[in-house]
Image: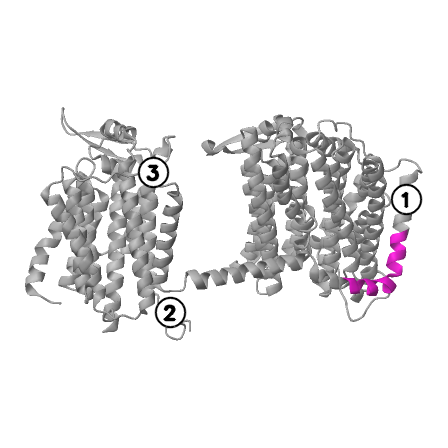
Amino acid sequence: MSSLILRTAARFLIPLLVLFSFYTLFRGHNQPGGGFAGGLLAATAFALYIFAWDAAAARRALVVDPCVLIGTGLMLALVAGLLPMVGGREFLTGIWAKLPLSEQSGFAVGTPVLFDVGVYLVIVGSSLLIITSLTGEEEERH
Amino acid sequence: MTHTRARSRAPAAFTALPLGMLALFVWLAATGGGTRVVGLPFGAEALGFALSFRLDGLSILFGMLISAIGVLVYVYAASYLAGRDDQARFFGWLSLFMLAMIGIVTAENLIALFIFWELTSLASWFLIGMDHERSEARGAALQALLVTAGGGLAMLAGFVMLGSMAGSFELSAIQQQGDAIRAHAHYLPVLLLVAAGAFTKSAQVPFHFWLPSAMEAPAPVSAYLHSATMVKAGVFLLARLLSVLGGTPQWVALLGVAGAVTMITGAVLAVLASDIKKILAYSTVSALGSLVLLIGIGSPAAVYAAVVFLFAHALYKAALFMAGGIIDHETGVRDVERLSGLRRSMPLTAAAAILGALSLVSFGPVLSFAGKEMVVLAVAGVGAGWSTLLQGLVYTTSMLLATAAALVVFRPLFGPPDPSVRGHDPSPAMWLPPLLLGASGVVLGLIPYGITRVLLAPAAAAIHPGASRLHVSLWHGVNLPLIMAAVATAAGVVLFLTRSAWRRAAGALAAISRFGPEAAWNALLRGAVSYAGWQTRVLQNGYLRSYLLFIIVTMVLLVVTAAGDGIRFRFAINDTQFHEIFFSAVIVAGALVAVRSRSRLGSVAALGAVGYSVALLYILFSAPDLAMTQFLIETLTVILFVLVIYRLPRYAILTPPAERRRDIALCALTGVVIAGLVLAAAHEAADPSLARFYGANSLEKAHGRNIVNVILVDFRALDTLGEITVVGVAAIGVLALLRLRPTAAGRRS
């Protein structure tokens, strides 16, 4: 499928979708969204890439192997769980730190955010692994 | 060059491990006295598991045996295996075994003990299967693993019951509750389960068959695991729990019968075998039987006898196995009838073997003789009728073991040298360890006082609080036991000399073994394998529709059974808005189109409509997170469908009408069940405290306003961790299915 309209649109849509997926991921703690939804959004962006070009190009654009994404995501989630144990707390206890931005407001970071990033990566990796596996064989046939 | 040097150095480096352990236990024994409990800051306290260790007389005795014999075995094995390139692997597993074994004997926590227990089974599996190219070795390894690890699982169940009775898995806490546990209604199941673990590990009849099979292992392994240490773990466990479970009629009957039967069976099988290692293995079975019998009797006299006999047996049996290993290593022959006159060509090995055999006969100035006399004394203390029977069994066993000793040592070493089978003494690293062990049996027999005070007496006191006055001595004057022992030994020698007369007749008896426990075990294994094969063929037949069928039928059956006494629900339509009805109608219409459509694309589109409508309903009922995810999932599903749709064949009706009718009926039933389930769930008022908890604590404690997300990544993060793992594994499974397809040639027919 090589459509000029689709490719041109995809050039603009894909960065926006990926950005939006990050946005969804990080706003998730306070508003609808989160790692799961964000991951699916990012996967959709790359699915669009596959339709506009092909699976090989999409894999090049992704730079890392989807399997690596899955592994990294699981590791991040695990690390998020293990970090509190260093401080003698139970596995997966949320620990938070506030980065002060000004007198009134601050930016809270904690292990649940890291955990959610892990979820995001696993979802992106898994979806893309399935999609590229399905398309990959299509190429081998032709 | 560096490679060979590294290879030759590796065993020496490994020997540091048992040496270090030996130093530790020597230090512990020297500073010892009383019971010390050491806890490590690991474990899962909520589950009652802690890595805590107990150091008392019993654990120091075992620890000393394990590490001291360990040093000799390591030295011996380095020469025995010289030139093999899998030495590092061997010593790795041997070291794992040694540490796990020390773990068993020093564990204070029962769960920790279980873990070490199974680790020794695992190490034993690897070590028996060292020569994994031979199918006999693999089979023997698997048999030993399944028998001992299976028994270990039964033991775990017993431990869990024991722990819940005592409220703790710590031995000291359990020992304090001994009276309550013995009076508990579930005492007998606990006893049977724990005994199953001990009996399988210590090769008691009817689980004895794995030990002779395990002789496929290299000689150092047989000497270390399968005579001196690991097989005594069962005896150790029973001794450890004597103060908890022991003393009851059930205990005495179970251990007494199993021990006595094993003692005599092992001895009989030993004289019927002709392979050096098998003879030794069966005599080990017999010795383990007498140890279990003694622990079963459980009197102070029996505990003394058990400790002395256990210690002496570990020394001389390891010596004999090592000497037998040398004969096998040098001549390549293990059949005693084919060996002759080796004493001339390998005098030092012969000396070690003769010293060991003297202990096996248990007659003369050896520690095991003192032990044997104590055994007689202990069984004489049992109730009237039984004591005569048991003494008779002990003497018969003595006689048969004397024959076995003559078979193992006299036959190969004496007589005219056989020119076709030659051998020479190997390097000192191989003959010195068995010689030292064999000689120690004599030296300690003559001067037993030091070892008694430092090792044996504390061990007996740790097993039985009343057993605090252990006295070992060889010479009690000319009395009935001495005369009986002499008669038994002489009878054994006569049996040996006349063996050609009775062994052939007894050989016919071997046919019985076709109906023995090993045959039953093998039949059980074959049955399990063929059942698994049948089950796989039926349940996992490769047809997606069968999988769906099984899953749906199972689910329906489960739900219907669970709701057996009827479900309550209220079906009422009120305050329903027009758009809600509209989306519901779209869902129903979409489902109908999906079923009726003649094209796959049409079905996919219809299902998409269903999905989006459901997502819209989520929004209407204010669940934006769910709706968002549902939209994305629907989108991705359509993408996936588009990717595969061109590769699927056209729609065709292949199933016969009867099957289709069955499927329709089943689907309708499933729909009804699910609808009922949903209605019932809506009817049951959900516990509001949960929602209130999340509402109150989401921002407060977890710094998040989106409760759904906070639940996912914080409150129930462990669930999410499990879920993303499943997602990742599923994706890799898809990759494997699609990419790593078997090639046409390799595809199954």
The secondary structure that dominates the magenta segment is: helix
What amino acid type is highlighted by mark number 1? Met
Q: Residue at x 55, y 33 (%)?
A: B163
Mark 2 and mark 1: span between their CA atoms? 71 Å
Q: Tell me: residue B136, above or below residue B103.
A: below
Q: Amino acid at mark 3?
A: Gly
Contact flag, marks 3 and 2 (Cβ < 8 Å): no
Q: Residues within 10 Å of mark 2 (few under 14, many from 20)?
A: few
C-alpha gap between disc 1 and disc 3: 69 Å
Secondary element at image label 2: loop
Q: Which residue has dot 2 on it?
A: B742
Please report the residue visible at 20 percent of the width from the left and 35 percent of the height from the top: B706
Residue position marked by numbered label 1 in the rendering: B484
Q: Position of residue B22 (x, y in %)?
A: 64, 39
Residue B715 sits above or below residue B654 on the image: above
Q: Position of residue B643 (x, y in %)?
A: 21, 64
The answer to whether any part of residue B169 appears in the image is: no
For label 3, the residue is: A81
Q: Which residues are magenta?
A: B491-509
Tell me the chain of label 2.
B
Q: How many numbered discs sit on the rendered protein?
A: 3
Is residue B496 shown in magenta?
Answer: yes
Q: Image point 27% across, 42% down: which residue? A: B679
Q: Position of residue B229 (x, y in %)?
A: 66, 45
